[in-house]
Amino acid sequence: MRRKAIIISSIFVIFALAIAVYALINPDPTIELVLVQHKTFGSEKAYTSQASEENAPPCYPYFVGVSNFINGLAVARKCCRFGVINTQGEIVLPFIYEGFFREDVNINHFGIERALERGFIAARYGGRWGAIDFTGEIIIPFEYDDVSFNNAHGVAIVRNGGVWIMARPREVGIIEIATGREIVSVGNFRRVDIGIESFGGNIASVANQRDLWGVVCLITGDMVIQPRYEQIIRPLRDDKFLLARSTRHWVLYTSQGKAIRIFSEEEIPAAAGAFTTSNCFDVRGDRILINPWERNTLLLDTDGNEIVPPIYSFITFTNWIQHEGTPSGNWAYVSVGTEQGVICIITGEFIIPLRHLENSHLLIYDENTAIIVEHTGFEYRERVFTFINISTNQITERPEGVSY
């Protein structure tokens, strides 16, 4: 048993030494560059740079292009180091970096090309991650185990620790890219969630070392909601409101930290599985939609008041089809068992009364027409369309110009 352990340890040491020796190989900066054209994505053409074969370094036969040229620049690899070249084959950033774009261990083309568009990139140097622009100026110092960007908010998330089982505790921080200002210091929190990049809200959810969640302002760095909740849910389309779960109840907050409504166990169960899909919490204008698991749906205004009684098993703002004429107005689909209808989210009144629709979907096509799509045939692959005039709520022939 001891002999086996010694053999395994020896193999590990040899492997580690091999990696260390490989990492110390420095590429020859005098290698002649030759531009060649090739196909990378479908029919799109791009350029990479290659070293002439007679001058190629022994550790890697070619000077390899990693990305397409964006704004006249491309990421390339020589030996085990990365740099940036221009379309003339001139070196813009020297080949001294151990990696670019931390999220992609195997070098993701699309992520790197997005970095070339925005003008800066995450880079690894001396075993640590930071960020640089394409003049070589350091934006984020090389002090971290991980760096990732949220372009919509102009911030970077930096992390230290927390990778291996025996590693030091995970610590995260948030840095403003334009100024390098530390919004959230590394060490106060272990997790951060800024949300979808299309969100316009300037907030982030953060969890402390006890895994309790709160909310921080990305402009000032101040705590909007103190970290005392087990879970924070953000809506599908907007960051105006948040749902926070304690061990006893859920609370609806504004993004400024104002508590609007505390929900009872009968309204929303105080459990981690209370929300299971992305459309369980949604916002449209000044209407808030909450679809908890195994509870009736709540449609609220911005003060937490109910627009309709909580009698519907499901409500959604999402239309099953989207096209140029699809309205994004003040309506929502409601269902109770096999009955479906459409209500006005301002008044709570029915636009289309409830109808018994089994194996069917009711959806709005345009301002005048709704469609019932019935699924029939083998595995419900065949569809039967019934058209409804919204103003009369009567079944009608296919209106002129309606194509579906």
Image: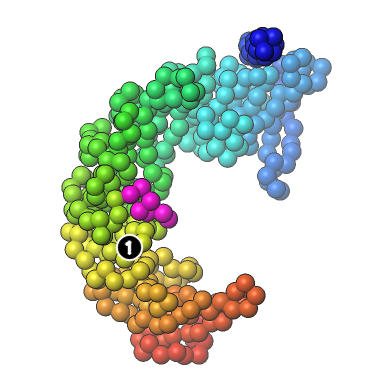
Q: Position of residue 156 (x, y in %)?
A: 40, 31
Q: Residue at x 25, y 74 (%)?
A: 348
In the rendered view, tell whether residue 317 sits above or below residue 155. Answer: below
Classify residue 361 as left or right of residue 310. right
Q: Position of residue 208 (x, y in %)?
A: 31, 31
Could you say which quadrant of the image residue 19 lies in?
top right
Q: Residue at x 32, y 71 (%)?
A: 312
Reading the image, the residue beneath label 1 is: 295
For label 1, count other residues whose C-alpha is less than 10 Å away and answer few (under 14), some (14-19) or many (20+).
some
Residue nearer the viewer, 203 or 338 = 338
In the rendered view, tell whether residue 211 sits above or below residue 398. Answer: above
Q: Residue at x 30, y 54 (%)?
A: 269
Does the rendering let one see residue 343?
yes
In the rendered view, tell whether residue 292 sits above or below residue 37. Answer: below
Could you say which quadrant of the image residue 28 lies in?
top right
Q: Which three-letter amino acid code belongs to the residue tagged 1?
A: Arg
Q: Position of residue 177 (x, y in %)?
A: 38, 30
Does the rendering let one see residue 346?
no
Classify residue 253 as left or right of residue 84. left
**Highlighted range, magenta:** 271-277
Q: Position of residue 61 (x, y in %)?
A: 77, 21
Q: Quadrant of the C terminus?
A: bottom right
Residue lying furthest front = 1
Q: Residue at x 48, y 30 (%)?
A: 120
Mark 1: which secondary structure?
loop
**Residue 273 part of the magenta-drawn span:** yes
Could you say which quadrant of the image residue 111 lies in?
top right
**Residue 330 part of the magenta-drawn span:** no
In the rendered view, tell whether residue 240 sits above or below residue 169. Answer: below
